[in-house]
């Protein structure tokens, strides 16, 4: 990776005619040898048209074998950015060549900790005030403008100071859809990752953030299991957004000062920003885990963040979701930073490597899909038994009307008389199903589970604004109702599992009795594997299964997120597309189309002339 500091930026002057007459630009990639001749690794040729049209975007080129090489193909790529120089670019390069200072270039360096065992032994982090209250030493340091006031603080004053607006913001990223403002407020109940806790040597915590092509880190709070990041520290970041469904990855690490030591991951989270409202300030707390759904996860503490999204053009954001996300690249020079980025995004376990824990987690995830049968059962009962679900106030009384049941009855009676409309109503049912799920989620007692409505996203497309007010969720709003709703669901799942286990035991006993009757009873017909059996010998057979299950789980996760409106923009476009197809299908003459399609197939495939196809084509091909 080359940067401005390593001489990667060039200003080339060429006449327009010469630029197109010559055969583009050639790049030669070599292996530097201090004592011998530099070896040519590969060549890249870029034609003039590509260079002329480039506007600073990332361009990736495959390396070609050097002239005279026997190799037909060589590994590696060369990544370039180029554009026609503006007056500012020319002035910038002139100044840079004279002063060797990159004025106007934003740069970001990861904070470096000054922690160490000697410092831990010689530093007191708590003391008592004159009135007997406990004071805490502020780390990594006090506010430079209020040193005496902020060097030592009580717990109450510290918590109040944390919630004040940040004084310094780091702006990173290249997206143009909007900005995500993230402040790391603090962590709680972190485990001690360092030895020597009896002398005060504790976790030296810092937080990393990875978002699209952005990577940033907070300051290091040394020897603290519940660190707080204060307004004057490096805790606030502006992340520029280029795709509406990008995930925000946050990791908590223990800083290790040794050059050969990696920073230890404590826990991580993935924050979905899709259904968060713009211009709303959220204070969010999450339990952190060292991995994503791998094995039996243990809570490794808690992190609290403050977050706000700024979106100048909501129509542009919604339309951007029609395109698939582009791959993003985060470039770092330090090996430890690479490990931090990787573990922040993926956790401690690499799902692409063979692991029985990963394999079991995929199986458990697929098994949990059985819980969705309860939702299907509830929906069918509500639909068929005309149970009310649509809330309406009439004459001062709240009523629940069975709107979906009425619609189903109306559509079914109409289709019985007009079966040619089945394709049209089939697409309409897809939209109806998605919108019904959206309504079910928005009616949840848990206000944090609400998502964008179809109408709000439609207004974004039509008028560029959803016209929805910012979220105003009060502390513990609907807590009791949401807790009761969740407990009912958990109880129902547990009872279903117990019933399934009971039926399994009964079936097992029946099988044992049947085997006794024919004299072939086995001591143990269970499927559990004993602890002394290793499955490593079958790694070659299990690893492909793990990869296939991983692909299946990722596909199911995406489909599930679309259905339940976690990916609300995808849900909106699928529902809208289904409605459009439903209207189009109304004008398609399906009976005529089926009749002539059948005629073409029969007269083409089943006629005696297929013998000629066999004689003059199939046989000769073989």
Image (cartoon, grey):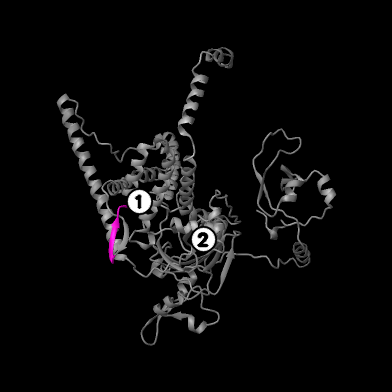
Q: Is residue 298 magenta?
A: no
Q: Position of residue 605 (x, y in %)?
A: 51, 20
Q: Secondary structure at mark 2?
A: strand
Front residue of 379 and 414: 414
Mark 2 or 1, nearer chain start: 2
Front residue of 502 and 124: 502
Q: Which residues are magenta?
A: 395-403
User: Which residue, given by chain and number where applicable, does mark 1 sit on?
Assistant: 296
Q: Residue at x 47, y 66 (%)?
A: 204
Report whether residue 617 is seen: yes
Q: Position of residue 283 (x, y in %)?
A: 43, 68
| Front tag of 2 and 1 | 2
Q: Is residue 398 magenta?
A: yes
Q: Residue at x 53, y 12 (%)?
A: 611
Mark 2 nearby-residue class (10 Å; few <14, some 14–19, many ≥20): many
Q: Secondary structure at mark 1?
A: loop
Toward which corner of the image does residue 299 lie, by quadrant?
bottom left
Does residue 132 appear left or right of residue 13 in this picture?
Answer: left
Front residue of 584 and 75: 584
Task: Kindly indicate whether the residue at mark 1 contacts the one at mark 2 (C-beta within 8 angstroms).
Answer: no
Q: Position of residue 477 (x, y in %)?
A: 34, 67
Q: Position of residue 360 (x, y in %)?
A: 37, 43
* Numbered tag placed on residue 178 in the rendering: none
User: Which residue, given by chain and number where applicable, does mark 2 sit on?
Assistant: 209
Q: Residue at x 44, y 65 (%)?
A: 203
């Amino acid at each position: 990776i080359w940067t401005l500091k390593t001489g990667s930026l060039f200003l080339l002057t060429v006449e327009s005619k010469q630029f197109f007459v010559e055969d583009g630009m050639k790049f030669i990639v070599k292996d530097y040898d201090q004592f011998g001749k530099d070896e040519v690794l590969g060549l890249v040729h870029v034609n003039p048209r590509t260079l002329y049209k480039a506007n600073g975007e990332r361009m990736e080129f495959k390396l070609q074998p050097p002239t005279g090489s026997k190799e037909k193909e060589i590994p590696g790529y060369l990544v370039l950015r180029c554009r026609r120089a503006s007056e500012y670019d020319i002035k910038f390069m002139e100044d840079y060549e004279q002063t060797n200072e990159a004025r106007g270039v934003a740069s970001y360096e990861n904070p470096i900790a000054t922690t160490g065992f000697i410092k831990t032994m010689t530093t007191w982090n708590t003391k008592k005030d004159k009135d007997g209250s406990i004071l805490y030493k502020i780390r990594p340091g006090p506010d430079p403008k209020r040193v005496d006031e902020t060097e030592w603080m009580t717990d109450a004053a510290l918590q109040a100071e944390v919630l004040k607006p940040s004084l310094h913001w780091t702006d990173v990223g290249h997206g143009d859809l909007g900005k995500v403002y993230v402040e790391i407020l603090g962590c709680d109940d972190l485990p001690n990752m360092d030895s020597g806790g009896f002398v005060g040597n504790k976790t030296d915590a810092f937080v990393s953030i990875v978002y699209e092509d952005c990577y940033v880190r907070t300051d290091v709070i040394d020897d603290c299991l519940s660190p707080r990041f204060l307004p004057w520290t490096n805790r606030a970041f502006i992340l520029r957004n280029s795709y509406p469904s990008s995930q925000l990855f946050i990791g908590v690490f223990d800083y290790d000062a040794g050059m050969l030591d990696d920073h230890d991951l404590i826990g991580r989270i993935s924050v979905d920003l899709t259904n968060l409202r713009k211009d709303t300030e959220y204070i969010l707390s999450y339990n952190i885990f060292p991995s994503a759904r791998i094995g039996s996860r243990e809570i490794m503490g808690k992190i609290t963040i403050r977050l706000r999204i700024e979106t100048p053009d909501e129509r542009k954001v919604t339309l951007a979701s029609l395109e698939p996300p582009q791959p993003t690249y985060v470039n770092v020079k330090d090996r430890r930073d690479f490990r931090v980025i990787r573990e922040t995004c993926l956790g401690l376990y690499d799902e692409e490597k063979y692991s029985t824990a990963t394999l079991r987690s995929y199986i458990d995830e697929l098994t949990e899909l059985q819980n969705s049968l309860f939702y299907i059962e509830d929906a069918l009962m509500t639909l068929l038994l005309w149970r009310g679900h649509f809330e309406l106030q009439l004459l001062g009384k709240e009523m629940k009307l069975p709107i979906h049941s009425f619609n189903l009855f109306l559509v079914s009676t109409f289709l019985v008389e007009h079966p040619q409309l089945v394709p049209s109503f089939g697409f309409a049912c897809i939209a109806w199903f998605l919108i019904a799920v959206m309504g079910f989620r928005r009616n949840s007692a848990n206000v944090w589970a609400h998502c964008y409505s179809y109408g709000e996203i439609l207004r974004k497309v039509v008028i560029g604004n959803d016209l929805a007010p910012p979220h105003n969720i009060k502390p513990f709003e609907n807590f009791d109702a949401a807790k009761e709703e969740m407990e009912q669901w958990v109880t129902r799942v547990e009872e279903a599992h117990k019933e399934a286990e009971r039926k399994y035991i009964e079936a097992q006993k029946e099988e044992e009795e049947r085997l006794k009757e024919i004299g072939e009873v086995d001591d143990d017909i269970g499927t559990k594997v004993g602890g002394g059996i290793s499955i490593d010998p079958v790694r070659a057979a299990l690893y492909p299964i793990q990869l296939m299950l991983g692909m299946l789980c990722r596909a199911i996760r995406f489909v599930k997120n679309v259905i339940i409106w976690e990916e609300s923009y995808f849900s909106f476009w699928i529902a809208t597309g289904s409605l459009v197809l439903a209207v189009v299908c109304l004008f398609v003459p399906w009976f005529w189309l089926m009749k002539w399609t059948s005629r073409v197939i029969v007269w083409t495939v089943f006629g005696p002339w297929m013998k000629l196809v066999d004689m003059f084509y199939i046989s000769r091909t073989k």
